[in-house]
């Protein structure tokens, strides 16, 4: 570093600042550019002996020659001097950076020279940038112009000596400072010229393989720039064209291979982003990469918003109806119901239910049907009921077959009934397995109908866990086996409570399904024997549907073992008492008809009374009880002509309070052709 030049530069700057503050013109201050500095550089030169400056106009060794004229130094021609840079911005001590270009040097020709500006300093704590320029002497090639240190090769052929001047411009926060340094190149003694350690330099001009350096005469490869951004899903490369690293997002690096997770993507700044599920509201099938429509994904998808029919759940993507709310306060003289609007059970006193004995009108006729549907056969059966003068219907499930392959709605069933019987016809029904999907609609239609019938009352969950009274008849209704074949306690408890508290002469248990031994097809249905037994012990006749044929038992003293009451063996004379009852299957309302499949082993005429083979392989096998021949009447699609077959659709009719006896009744089954297939009498023994 040349102190004299630095001193003049600082003086010029201080003068300018003072001039600005005092509104003085600049012409009274010294200038501070490199050209000014060169005028005093002789103070460091070894060629000056008296410290004075010639005044004859002859340039001193430190002054540049006139423009475009070569300089002669002992016979050696030196290139015209490089025009020094313009004046730098003013610098005030303590403001902006401090530039230090290093100490002046004297070197041999062909030597490798290092310019060192690492002594430059920051005064504001910012980052420094560097710029080296040569402003006098023969032009040389700097290894770098924008680093703190740089190197160049001194000219090889020097007659006596030449001077090379360089300026270091340092910038910090848009403020600059400069300093200069001189390198004097002298003629080396023979044999002392230092050869270029790495002739031609080491740089290969490529960015992506790093900066090559010359160490001990050998070119050393540089270190490649680190382009790793730490993001696993980017492809990190070095771009030679732009001298920069490129980090390109690649979605495939985030893909987990699962369709149901959605398409994962790569964010170049943050990494992998989770995909969006592709099947909203549907089941996503990973093996097939498809979206599948299902009933439900969660329980919320199944809720119908109703309180009284229980909480629906989603099981294996299928909606399962809830268990209906049981509204039973255990008081026989209250009308128990579930209030959907208030979401509570309601118990209303019912004085009429406190009456004892029978107030069934004389010759009061009812019709018992099951498995109706909406079709021509169903219409014929309803027409038969109307023409027979039946005053009410007990329907044993499967009203309109609302979820069959040819679906009928609950409203279609209602229209069929209204057209033939009228909107005010007394109609009491239990739920069937084909009614589940539309049962809330059926319930509302049945409830509205009951409300239009004078003297009819129903309590509980209509058709599921309910009881109804009309014209002295007490009907206990259950939906056992419809919703859950493993849950029976609510139904058993309901039947027991209702029959224990009731004192009516005529009681009916009504439900849809039946156990395997209580019908003659091959259909095996899980069913709880307790339901049958509670009705037998409660003095109620048992009326069921489901099997598409007509069957009636004799009087049974045990429905679990299917034992015939020894005091009432006659097939056409029945009684209901504290220990005896009978069972009817009436499922030929209008749907398909089925064959007899049980009780046919070994008997050449299995379809003829007594409908059971008495061989050892049959007796006690569940086809016949040990007392044998429990079936009193059978009517199926393969019933022989002599027994009234083959069957067609029809209904069971029961007349109560006959011959002036309120405890006597008579039943008969009649088909739509007008044929009477079965007749029997019933006696109700009130304790």
Image: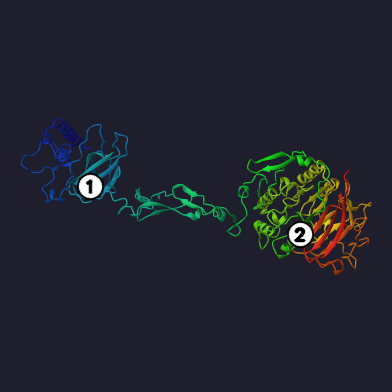
Disc on res. 140: none
Question: Dot 1: few (<14), some (14–19), or many (≥20) neighbours within 10 Å?
Answer: few
Residue, disc 1: 189
- Coordinates of residue 523 in the picture (x, y in percent): 79, 59
Residue 545 showing in the rendered view: no
Residue, disc 2: 385
- Coordinates of residue 165 in the picture (x, y in percent): 20, 44
Q: Earlier in the sequence, mark 1 or mark 2?
A: 1
- Coordinates of residue 234 in the picture (x, y in percent): 46, 52
Question: Dot 2: few (<14), some (14–19), or many (≥20) neighbours within 10 Å?
Answer: many
Q: Disc 1 versus disc 2: distance between alpha carbons?
A: 141 Å
Label 1, secondary structure: give it.
Answer: loop
Label 2, secondary structure: give it.
Answer: helix
Q: From the viewer's side, name the closer residue of 426 and 615.
A: 426
Asked if residue 169 is positioned above or below residue 241 in the image, the reply reads above
Which quadrant is the N terminus positioned in? top left
Asked if residue 53 is positioned above or below residue 530 in the image, the reply reads above
Taking the image as shown, residue 353 lies to the left or right of residue 555, namely: left
Q: Which residue is painted at 42% across and 48% down in the image?
A: 226
Asked if residue 211 is positioned above or below residue 381 in the image, the reply reads above
Mark 1 vs mark 2: in front:
2
């Amino acid at each position: 570093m040349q102190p004299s030049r630095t001193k003049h530069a600082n003086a010029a700057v201080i003068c300018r600042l003072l001039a600005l503050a005092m509104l003085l013109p600049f012409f009274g201050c010294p200038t501070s550019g490199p050209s000014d500095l060169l005028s005093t550089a002789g103070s460091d030169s070894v060629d000056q002996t008296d410290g004075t400056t010639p005044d004859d106009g002859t340039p001193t060794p430190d002054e540049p020659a006139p423009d475009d004229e070569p300089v002669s130094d002992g016979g050696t021609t030196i290139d015209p001097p490089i025009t020094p840079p313009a004046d730098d911005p003013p610098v005030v001590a303590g403001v902006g950076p401090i530039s230090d270009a290093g100490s002046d040097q004297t070197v041999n020709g062909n030597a490798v020279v290092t310019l060192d500006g690492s002594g430059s300093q920051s005064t504001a704590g910012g980052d420094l940038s560097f710029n080296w320029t040569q402003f006098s002497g023969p032009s040389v090639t700097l290894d770098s112009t924008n680093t703190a240190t740089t190197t160049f090769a001194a000219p090889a052929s020097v007659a006596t000596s030449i001077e090379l001047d360089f300026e270091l411009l340092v910038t910090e926060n848009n403020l600059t400072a400069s300093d200069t340094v001189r390198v004097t190149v002298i003629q080396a003694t023979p044999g002392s010229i230092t050869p270029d350690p790495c002739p031609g330099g080491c740089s290969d001009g490529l960015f992506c393989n790093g900066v090559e350096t010359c160490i001990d005469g050998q070119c050393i490869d540089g270190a490649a720039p680190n382009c790793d951004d730490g993001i696993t899903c980017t492809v990190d490369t070095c771009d030679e064209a732009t001298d920069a690293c490129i980090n390109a997002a690649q979605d495939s690096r985030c893909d987990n291979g699962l369709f149901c997770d959605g398409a994962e993507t790569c964010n170049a700044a943050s990494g992998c982003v989770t995909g969006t599920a592709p099947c909203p509201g549907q089941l996503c099938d990973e093996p097939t990469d498809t979206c599948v429509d299902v009933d439900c994904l969660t329980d919320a998808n199944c809720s119908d918003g109703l309180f009284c029919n229980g909480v629906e759940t989603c099981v294996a993507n299928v909606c399962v109806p809830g268990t209906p709310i049981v509204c039973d306060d255990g008081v026989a003289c209250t009308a128990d119901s579930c209030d959907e609007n208030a979401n509570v059970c309601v118990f209303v006193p019912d004085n009429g239910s406190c009456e004892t004995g029978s107030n069934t009108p004389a010759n009061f006729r009812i019709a018992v049907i099951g498995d109706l549907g909406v079709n021509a056969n169903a219409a014929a059966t309803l027409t038969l009921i109307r023409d027979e003068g039946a005053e009410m219907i007990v329907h044993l499930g499967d009203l309109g077959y609302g979820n069959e392959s040819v679906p009928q709605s609950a409203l279609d069933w209602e229209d069929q009934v209204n057209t033939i019987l009228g909107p005010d016809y007394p109609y009491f029904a239990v739920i069937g397995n084909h009614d589940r999907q539309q049962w809330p609609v059926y319930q509302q239609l049945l409830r509205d109908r009951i409300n239009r019938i004078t003297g009819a009352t129903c309590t509980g969950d209509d058709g599921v866990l309910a009881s109804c009274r009309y014209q002295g008849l007490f009907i206990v209704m259950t939906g056992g086996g419809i919703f859950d074949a493993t849950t029976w306690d609510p139904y058993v408890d309901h039947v027991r409570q209702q029959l224990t508290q009731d004192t009516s002469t005529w009681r009916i248990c009504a439900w849809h399904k039946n156990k395997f031994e209580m019908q003659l097809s091959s259909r095996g249905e899980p069913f709880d024997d307790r339901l049958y037994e509670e009705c037998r012990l409660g003095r109620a006749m048992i009326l069921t549907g489901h099997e598409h044929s007509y069957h009636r038992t004799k009087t049974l003293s045990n429905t679990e073992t299917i034992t015939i009451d020894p005091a009432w063996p006659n097939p056409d004379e029945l009684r209901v008492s504290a220990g005896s009852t009978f069972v009817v299957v009436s499922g030929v309302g209008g749907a398909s008809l089925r064959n007899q499949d049980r009780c046919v082993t070994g008997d050449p005429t299995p379809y003829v009374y007594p409908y059971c083979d008495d061989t050892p392989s049959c007796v006690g096998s569940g086809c016949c009880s040990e007392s044998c021949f429990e079936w009193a009447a059978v009517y199926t699609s393969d019933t022989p002509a002599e027994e009234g077959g083959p069957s067609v659709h029809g209904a069971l009719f029961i007349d109560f309070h006959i011959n002036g006896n309120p405890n006597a009744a008579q039943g008969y089954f009649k088909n739509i052709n007008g044929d009477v297939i079965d007749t029997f009498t019933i006696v109700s023994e009130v304790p």
